Amino acid sequence: MSNESLANLLKEERRFAPPAELAARANVTAEAYEQAKADRLGFWAAQARRLSWASAPTETLDWSNPPFAKWFADGKLNVAYNCVDRHVENGLGDRVALHFEGEPGDTRSITYAELLGEVSRAANALTELGVQAGDRVAIYMPMIPETVVAMLACARIGAPHSVVFGGFSADALATRIQDADARVVITADGGYRRGKPSALKPAVDEALTRPGTESVRSVLVVRRTGQETAWTKGRDVWWHDLVRRQSDQHTPQAFDAEHPLFILYTSGTTGKPKGILHTTGGYLTQVSYTHHAVFDLKPESDVYWCTADVGWVTGHSYIVYGPLSNGATEVLYEGTPDTPHQGRWWEIVQKYGVTILYTAPTAIRACMKWGDDIPAKFDLSSLRLLGSVGEPINPEAWVWYRKHIGGDTTPVVDTWWQTETGAIMISPLPGVTDTKPGSAQVPLPGIAATVVDDDANEVPDGAGGYLVLTEPWPSMLRTIWGDDQRYLDTYWSRFKNRYFAGDGAKKDDDGDIWLLGRVDDVMLVSGHNISTTEVESALVSHPKVAEAAVVGATDPQTTQAICAFVILRQEAAAAEAKVEAASADAEGDLVEELRAHVAKQLGPIAKPKRILPVAELPKTRSGKIMRRLLRDVAENRALGDVTTLTDSSVMELIQSRLPAASSED
Ligand code: WT7
């Protein structure tokens, strides 16, 4: 995109200074940037001292065999000890670790002392099942406390876990079990979703019929819903039988800092999923530090809530390891935001007095669509900090989030990172940075990121290119499980000695970083590179549009033509439904209005050729729009793989709208 259109995009730029009280008491001040700049490794060595080491590291980074990093390699520690035991030893046993809110409304508050007992029992149970340090354990669970306990129990005995999101199919589970060669699967009969029990165990049973899953000796099953559950004698064992009868004492063993902590699979656009490997000391150092710095956590008074599922890296780093290593009190919610009503999240914030909320743009936009009046019914005054992660947050949603959820006073931190980075990399610091809606802004202290052009030259302020990380960081992935070559090819081959994140980005005139989405999503229109994110952001800045997804469809004249799918705001959609019945022209008018709006915001080159109002967009369960499928639709192709879609009927709905669209061309 031209610099002129970037200037247009940024012209409405607003900034919000940190609230004075927050800045005055902030965990991290501007000094941290200076310290890290002066001595990056010394800075990380200091952050590692946040943890309790059984044997303190003397070495910080070993980068003698790049890009295979070793951090704190001669140190030894136990992750579960750091997340649980040490808080109890420090006299904080009565502090609540988890406020669990089940979707049906059942609740449990679990203190650190109780968590220690549970994790110890589960560690003993896994040991009884024959799990040893280094063995892999697959976890396929709903969002319940036992999931957190299971992860910590694995960490405690040095058995890397592979959490597979509970919404994935038996096939996806089987592939991940095979690739990791898992020895045990921990699951539940089911969980609650949208007001109903939703079974999980049948998918495990099915997965274990597939060849290559014979490595699984035992299936440990939590009873959550009480639904009928098929049972394989000799293999299946109930959590309440096995775990309950264990001793609540367990001595944690210290592991090498580079001992594998977990594998988490990310689905690439092609090929089999990549098992991202994270290890112990560096990972825990960075998740702990970033959680402390970016969320300004005051463990004695804050109530923190990250709405992600533990099946994603956000759940690993910012529900389990970051917050618990910091002794946080946090909310764990099982269900969906609109069950039984669209105010459920805000009701939970009010009930527990949540002070820090971390969620995703897709959820924020859903709440915008449902209407401002819904959060307005609840007391959200406890909130003092809001976070966003997962995709670029359009300025419109950022401002809405701050205003309608944050009472126009809370800072919003837009945090950029990836499964691969393990922890937050680019984000404002809430007590330091003047925040800008829509920008993740600055690399955290100790993190080196920049934007480069095709030839790996750093671009000047005001220009765009590819986001790269230029120095190793403690929580970086160590490799792709079982495939070092793929690790090299995927992340380290595009630019020499640079980690390429796969994202497009821009620096504004202040040098702040704006993420522009995956580079695979950049469109080429009449010789111009246009990012899908920018066009989406422009569309959503129109008052009638709640959400937008943009793709480039092959076009004989312009190489690619911009094709937009939009969800209208509730009021606009209702009006639209009425006029649509009366005349197809009315829809044409709205489409023209939106095209003109984008042209005005970004310039005529970015004007979508087609705009199609739809009721829903195809999304993965982590809320990312599946543009690949929309491209299939826009190019009139048969749909590709839809198995990771939340709701496969969405695509039928969208396709059924197509004839109307082609008449508008
Ligand atoms: C990709 C990583 C990080 C936890 C959840 C997603 C996109 C993530 C942002 C942000 C713009 C973002 C990037 C990144 N992304 N956060 N704040 N602004 N884009 O983890 O599934 O590994 O996805 O999500 O495209 O590469 P993931």
Image: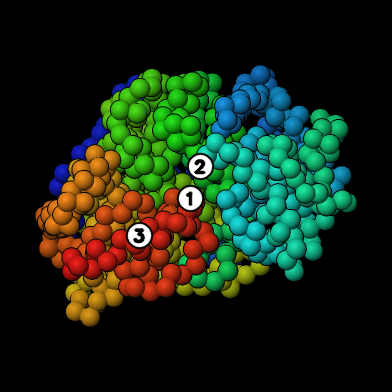
Q: Is the CB of mark 1 within 8 Å of ligand 1? A: yes
Helix, strand or loop at disc 3?
helix
Q: Which of 558 and 68 is in front in this view?
A: 558
- Residue at x 82%, y 45% (from the top left corner): 237
What amino acid type is highlighted by mark number 2? Ala
Q: Is residue 268 visible?
A: yes
Q: Position of residue 144 (x, y in %)?
A: 63, 36
What amino acid type is highlighted by mark number 3? Ile
- Residue at x 62%, y 52% (from the top left corner): 164
Please, is residue 114 above or below residue 470 in the view? above
**With 69 as the anchor, is 572 left or right in this view?**
left
- Read off the residue under disc 1: 622
Mark 1 crowdedness (10 Å alpha carbons): few <14, some 14-19, many ≥20: some
* Label 2 – label 1 distance at C-alpha: 8 Å
Q: Where is residue 535 in the image (x, y as percent from the top left)?
A: 24, 57
Occupied quadrant, residue 315: top right
